[in-house]
Image (cartoon, rainbow, N blue to C red):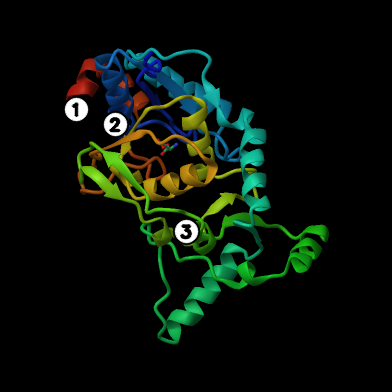
Amino acid sequence: MIAPPRQKPTFRFAPSPNGPLHLGHALSALLNHDMANLASGRFLLRIEDIDLARCTPELEAAVIADLAWLGLAWEQPVRRQSAHFREYQLALAALIERGLVYPAFMTRGEVRQRVEEAERSGAVWPRDPDGAPHYPADDRERSDLERRQRIDVGQRHAWRLDMGKALASLGEPLSWTESGDGERGDIAADPGAWGDVVLSRSDAPSSYHLSVVIDDALQGVTHVVRGLDLFQATSVHRLLQALLGLPQPLYHHHRLITGPDGRKLSKSAGDVGLATLRASGLSAADIRRRVGL
Ligand code: GLU
């Protein structure tokens, strides 16, 4: 019998160009690159720019300059999520067709108010692993007619996964294979912990969760190497892969780089960027040492 061709190990670094890269990104990019080399595999760069308001061409150029300075080389062409909204929309349409996704009309303010009211009266409102409150059930219960009427009059809405229905449609419990710096081995996925996640935002025709699983599949990614801050999100990714019939990659969630105060570095907190470190005279080899590689 002829063995099927083995897929070449394929790794990707997938930054969102909404701010300057810092040491945490350097660790992730270098690890992906080194692991790809070690496996004689492919190293891809993917620009996750679905948030068109926060991601700019200037920030993307800065990301690319930082990665080139680190000595990384990646395959061309680079995939930009903003060029693939149609693919995400097609996948979303298939889930809507199956009744697994519904239009969600509540604004952030309305959700906050609802949660505050409930918590004031002593109720425990469920929260996702990142601490955000689950979306209230109101929109899940609406009739198709009411949904259509609201959309027809132009009411802004996101599209959310009906987590209960999605879980009920699965044949067996989900898990993933993990080799990272936290828990390892066969990890049981718990997508229910996230509630009705957003698959398409009111201000962008996709969401992080939806685009990431579609792109990993379309690009033939076999190894997802990223920070431990995305460990729990993998449960949602495994669920979407199962619902959309996509292959599952292996996962490796690496340690996070923390600042002097012990919290993980972040773009929004203005943590020192790679470009600033470069301007201060550090070399790419110094960065490798700083991130412990
Ligand atoms: N774009 C995400 C970020 O910058 C990473 C997504 C991933 O690696 O799955 O945090």
List the residue tagged with mark 2: 23
Q: Secondary structure at mark 1?
A: helix
Q: Is mark 3 within 8 Å of ligand 1?
A: no
Residue 48 drawn above or below residue 38: below
Mark 1 Cα-neighbour bin, 10 Å: few <14, some 14–19, many ≥20: few
Label 3 and label 1: CA atoms lie apart by: 43 Å
Using the rendered view, name the quadrant where residue 287 is placed.
Answer: top left
Residue 45 at x, y = what percent? 44, 22
Q: In the drawing, does residue 47 fall left or right of residue 160? A: left
Using the rendered view, name the quadrant where residue 35 is placed.
Answer: top left
Residue 246 at x, y = what percent? 49, 36
Q: Earlier in the sequence, mark 1 or mark 2?
A: 2
Nearest to viewer (mark 3 / mark 1): 3
Q: In the drawing, does residue 81 fall left or right of residue 75? A: right
Q: Amino acid at mark 3?
A: Leu
Q: Secondary structure at mark 2?
A: helix
Residue 182 at x, y = what percent? 20, 44
Tell me the residue at 63%/68% (across/down).
139
Q: Nearer the viewer, residue 16 or 56?
A: 16
Q: Secondary structure at mark 3?
A: helix
List the residue tagged with mark 1: 290
The image quadrant where one finds the N terminus is top left
Q: Nearer the viewer, residue 113 or 271?
A: 113
Residue 61 at x, y = what percent? 50, 21
Mark 3 Cα-neighbour bin, 10 Å: few <14, some 14–19, many ≥20: some
Nearest to viewer (mark 3 / mark 2): 3
The image quadrant where one finds the C terminus is top left
**Circles 1 and 2 in contact, beta carbons < 8 Å:** yes
Tell me the residue at 32%/43% (across/down).
176
List the residue tagged with mark 3: 167
